[in-house]
Amino acid sequence: MRRAIEVATLSPEDVPVGAVILGPDGTELAAAGNEREATGDPTAHAEVLALRRAAARLGTWRLDGCTLVVTLEPCTMCAGALVLARVATLVFGAWEPKTGAVGSLWDVVRDRRLNHRPEVYSSVLEAECAALVRGFFRRPATPGSD
C-alpha cells in the first residue's frame, strides 16, 4: 500500500488515487495514478491504467494470481474491470461512500452472479489513504476543475 500511496501523489492535478498490480510472486508488474485530467480520458482511473499496463507486460488480459493494491475503494467501472481481468486479490485503503463498488454503495466484486470473485482486504492504511483524498478536495479550486 505504501507504493500505491507514493504513486497517488505523482499527479497533482487529479484526485490522488494510486494503484499497483503485483504478480503471483509479489513482484510489481505495473503502477498508475489517476490520469483523467492529464489525458482527458474519463476511463483513465488508476486501477484501469494499472490493469492495462500489467496485461501488456504479461502479454495476456488474464491476471490470474495477481493482486491489485489501490488507495481508494474502486468504483463500478474499476471493480468490473478487475473482475473481468480475473485479479485474485484486491487490497484497498480508504472507503468511498459516494461511488464505491466493493461494499460502500455497491458490491460488484462479491456478486454471486459473476463467474469470478476476488478475495478482498479493505481498510489497509485507511487513515493515510483517506487523508490524501481529503487534502486534495480541501485545496482551493482551480479554473476548469470539478
Image: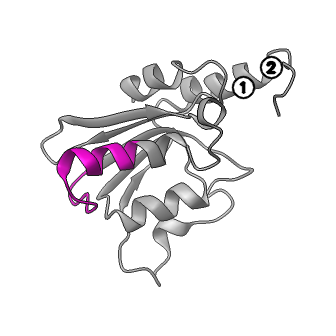
Residue at 29% in and 59% down: 88
Q: Quadrant of the N terminus?
A: top left
Compared to residue 103, the image places residue 52 above or below, namely above
Q: Is residue 102 visible?
A: no
Query: Would you say residue 36 sits in the magenta stretch?
Result: no
Q: Which residues are magenta?
A: 50-66
Query: Would you say residue 62 sits in the magenta stretch?
Result: yes
Numbered tag placed on residue 102 in the rendering: none
Tag 2 secondary structure: helix
Q: Is residue 49 visible?
A: yes
Q: From the viewer's perspective, tell me whether residue 68 is left or right of residue 75.
A: left
Q: Position of residue 36 (x, y in %)?
A: 62, 37
Residue at 57% in and 66% down: 107
The front one of 20 and 96 is: 20
Residue at 50% in and 39% down: 46
For the residue carrying disc 2, how many other residues have a C-alpha within 10 Å: few (<14), some (14-19), or many (20+)? few
Q: Residue furthest left?
A: 25
Give the alpha-carbon distance from disc 1 to disc 2, as whole Å: 6 Å
The residue beneath circle 2 is 138
Q: Residue furthest bottom?
A: 113
Q: From the viewer's perspective, tell me whether residue 112 is left or right of residue 36.
A: left
The front one of 107 and 14 is: 14
The residue beneath circle 1 is 134
CB contact under 8 Å: marks 1 and 2 = yes
Q: From the viewer's perspective, tell me whether residue 110 is left or right of residue 127.
A: left
Q: Quadrant of residue 132?
A: top right
Q: Quadrant of residue 134?
A: top right
